[in-house]
Each structure stands twice: as structure tokens, then as C-alpha cells.
Amino acid sequence: MKLPGILADNVKRQKDIGYVLPSSIAASIIFLAISFDVIFGNYPENTKGVAVISIGFGGSVYIILQIFLVTPRIQKYRSLYVWVNAVISGLGLSLLFIALDEAHHTLFDVLLILAVTSTAILSGRGPTYLLIVISSGGACLLAHQGKLTSLTDWTIHLMPMVVSVVITETILRLRQATQKQIHRLEMMNTFSQQINSSLETGQVLSILNAALQKAIDADSYYVGLVDTDTIRLDLFYDSGEYFNDVKIPLTGTFSGWVIENQKPLFLPDLREDVQLEGVQRMQVGKTKPSLSWMGVPMKTAHITGLSAVGSYKPNAFSQADMELLSNLAQHAALALDNTVHHQRVEEQSRLDSLTGTYNHRYFLEALQDHLEQISPNGQVISLIMLDIDYFKQYNDSFGHQVGDEILIKLCKTIQQYIKKTDFVGRWGGEEFAIALPGARGDEAHQVAERVQKSMQSMILVNPKQAQIPAPTVSQGISVFPDEANDIDQLIYLADQRLYNAKERGRNQIEPNPSHWGKIQSSKRKRGAPN
């Protein structure tokens, strides 16, 4: 979990103190050891002995104060404090080096390395190099002025500074790598929490889009899902621009190779020939070609696809980037799989299990939504209520299997004569409702006639494979807003006309076509739009 603001800084500072505590304790012990050696030993110069004792005890106290009192409480002025601390530490070490005799210079080298280690961890590159220059550079040269007469002398006395530089860069690079890995782990943790809680495909892709931008330095990236013989790029970003409705071939492409082989593909330098049989480079998005590319497969029970990133620079990605992309893709695949499963479950809850049409409840919801959408615009919507004549006799005479077959074939017949924007619902038993947004009464009557004629020509056989008579249907039509002001009136009127059609002898459509001519004539007289 990502910690906010000051709390995160405090936690980080406590970790840093924990890292440098061993070296600080060791430095304090060395300071004290030098002091006690001077006190109880035979130091050659009394003045220098006093200086060494003062610096030794002072250094120990300074280290203890910094670790336990100053560093944990410095917040506002931390950027200034690290430089001041580097100057004080460097001057202290310089004075100690000048005061020490040659027998104790090795201890100074150890102290320098410990100081450099602590400063590199706590303060970074700049203050650490300042410490090195002050302590082992100018001060040491001043102490040995006139004594360094050969290259060997210079090498020996500059060696602690060289070692300090090596240690500094090693620590900083390890620290940078560690922080980068921690950042990626934190990002993956946040990403997985966000993406696993989403059940909308668009939201999943949006979260993945943000994660890819933060995690991998790439010029382009996309998420593609298999759609028959192509790969549909549901998310495609290239050089600051998003592209929609892009499809690429499933065969003969890098992406297709990843999906077909279900293996990751890492191409660090596309200036070189790619040895993949039957695969050629394909340019999509901007005209500028990618010189680095990597893709990983995404495979679950409900989806098949890939995630891929590209760069205009060669050798732009590392193996760590490849592993991160793979982890992101795996989480995204599971999340997308959940959205597809959720959508299918929701869709199934809306449908009649036998015919695949909307169930009664959802048909009413969809019809109400359409009425609310078209009402302000003065558009129309027609409703057909349809019932199979003498359906019970088919069940009783030929069995429910034949009855189910009639219901299924009826719904398939209706789907042949309506648009994609139209929808059908099972009202109950053998009764169905057909909503035709944008269709006038005469257009709805034409649909009803086509369904009527198709039902009469339907071929049915009984369980003994003997042909049986085709069923007929009765239908009633109403139109909003020409004849009804709301959904209740619309349904009631269509239902009444269905009843009238049955009363007239069944296999009828109510009202007759002339009725719709009168409706249109009345609207023209009122000046209403058609």
C-alpha cells in the first residue's frame, strides 16, 4: 500500500537510518578507540594528542546526535542540512587526518569509507563528493605538502579518495536499482488493486493505459484482442495520439506470432533482420517506424490477445521491462476476462433462456429507455404485440418439443425482418413484443405482414417425422407518441388490438393499413412532423 506524504517520507527516513546505523556505530567506536589510544598510549606530540582526543570524542558525539536526534526530525530544511553535514563531516575528518600520526592513517581510511557510505545512503551524490573532496582531497594534500615527490606517493595518498568514489557510485547505483524495483512493485500493487475491482472493459483499458505510461518508457503501445482472423486494437497509443478502430492481420505480423505461439517476443533492435518464418514488419499508427518492440500474450477462458510496446530508439527496453510488461498483461488479461464474463452473465440475465430474446422485465426497461430518449426529439416508436394462434394445441397434440421449436423458429423469423436497433421480448408463454424505434405505423404493419407470411410457410414435423400444419400468428400494433403518451398506454393499446385480431378470427393484424393513412393525414393537418 502506498503511504501518503509526510508519513511516507518518515518511513523512508527511518529505513535510511537503519541502513547507516551499523557504519555509524563502527565510526563512533573507531573515534573512541583513537581517543583512548592517545590517552593511555604514548602519543608523540602533546598538542596533537589533545586535538585527536577532542576530535575523537567530538566525532562520536556528533554521530550519535545526527543519527538519533537531528536526522529523524529534519524535514523542512533537509536539502540544506545534507550539504552542511557533508561540510562538517569533511572538515572534521580533515582535521583528524592532520592531527594523526602516520601509524593511525589506516584508521582514517576506514573512517572515510564509513563516512562516505553513510553520506551516500542518506544524502546522495552531490554531498558525498563534497565530503570526499574536503576530507581526502585538499586536506590530505595540505598535510603532505612537499612530501609527495613521486607518482607512487601520489597514488598511495589518493587511493582512499579513488576507493571512496567507487564505493559512492556502487552504493548509488544499487540504491537506484533498488528504488526502481520498489517503485515497480508499488505500482504493480496499486495497478492490481485498481484493475481487479473493475468490471467495465473501458475502465480496465484506461487503468492499463495509465500503468503502461508510468511503468515503461515507450513511444507506442497497444492492447489487441483476437476478432475472427484479425487483431482488434482496443487500446492503441502512438507518439502522443490515440487511434481507434484499428485492426491488424492475425497472420504474418509480430503480434500474430505472439498470439499463435503464445510466447513473448523481444526485439531490441529492429534495424537488424528478424528471423521469424512468414512474419513481416507492418507499419500502423504514425509513419515513423519503431526500432525496438516487445509483445507478450494474453490468454484466458474468454479472451485471446496481446500487449505490446514499441520505441523509436534501438535497444530501448531491458529484460526487466519485458518482465514488467508480462506482469501487467497477465493482470489485465484476468481483469478483461472478468469483464467479459460479467457482461455475459448480465446479458444472460436479460434474455429468455429458450428463445434468446429479452425477458419481460428487461424488455420493459429497454422500451422505457427508448421512449425517454426519443420523446424530446418528437421521434416515433412502434410496438407490435404478437401471439401464436392455438399454441396449446401444438403442445398437447405434438409435445412440448415441437412447441419449443415453433417458439425458436418464430423468434428467428422476426429477427430476419427487423433492424439492429429494434428489439424483441418474450411477453409470456407464446406471446411476444417487438419494439421498432423510428418506425411509423405503416412500416410496423409491413414487418408484421412479413412475419405472418413466413410463419405460414414454416415447415414442421412431429416426432415421427410427419409434416404438421404451420402455425399462424395474431398481431396488434400501436405507435408512440401518435396514439399513446406513455409506455402503459402504448402497451395497453397494442394488447387490445391483439385481442381484436384474435376476435376477428386469428391470423390477423390490427389495425388495418388504412388506419395509418388516417394518422398521417391528421398529423399533416396539425402541422406535426412526419
Image (spheres, rainbow, N blue to C red):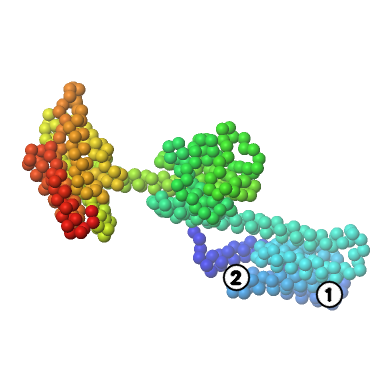
x and y, in percent, of residue 325 in the image? 54, 48
Instruction: Give 4 or 391, whichever is nearer the viewer.
Output: 391
Which residue occupies 55% across, 49% down?
Answer: 286
Residue kind at label 2, given as amino acid type: Pro
The percent position of residue 378, horizontal first and vertical second, equals 25, 57
At 81% from the left edge and 67% from the top edge, which residue is drawn?
137
The count of marks equals 2
Relative image position of residue 128 (x, y in whole percent): 71, 65
Rendered residue at 90%/64% (across/down)? 148
Secondary element under disc 1, as helix, strand or loop, is helix
Q: Is mark 2 on a helix, strand or loop?
A: loop
Residue at the (84%, 77%) spot, across then down: 47
| Left or right, residue 154 beside residue 246 | right
Looking at the picture, does residue 147 appear above or below residue 169?
A: below
Mark 2 and mark 1 in contact (Cβ < 8 Å)? Answer: no
Q: Which of the 4 quarters of the picture holds residue 122?
A: bottom right
The answer to whether one can see residue 487 in this image is no
* Near-viewer residue (454 or 27): 454
Question: How far apart are labels 1 and 2 at the CA level?
Answer: 34 Å
Residue 81 is left or right of residue 45, and the answer is: left
The disc label shown at residue 48, or none? 1
**Disc assigned to residue 486:** none
Q: Residue 89 location in percent, x, y?
A: 73, 71
Residue 164 appears in the figure: yes
Pointer 2: residues within 10 angstroms few (<14), some, or many (20+)? some
Which is nearer the N-term, disc 1 or disc 2? 1
Q: In front of the other: label 1 or label 2?
A: 2
Nearest to the observer: residue 17 or residue 221 = 221
Residue at which label 2 appears:
72
Amino acid carrying mark 1 in the image: Lys
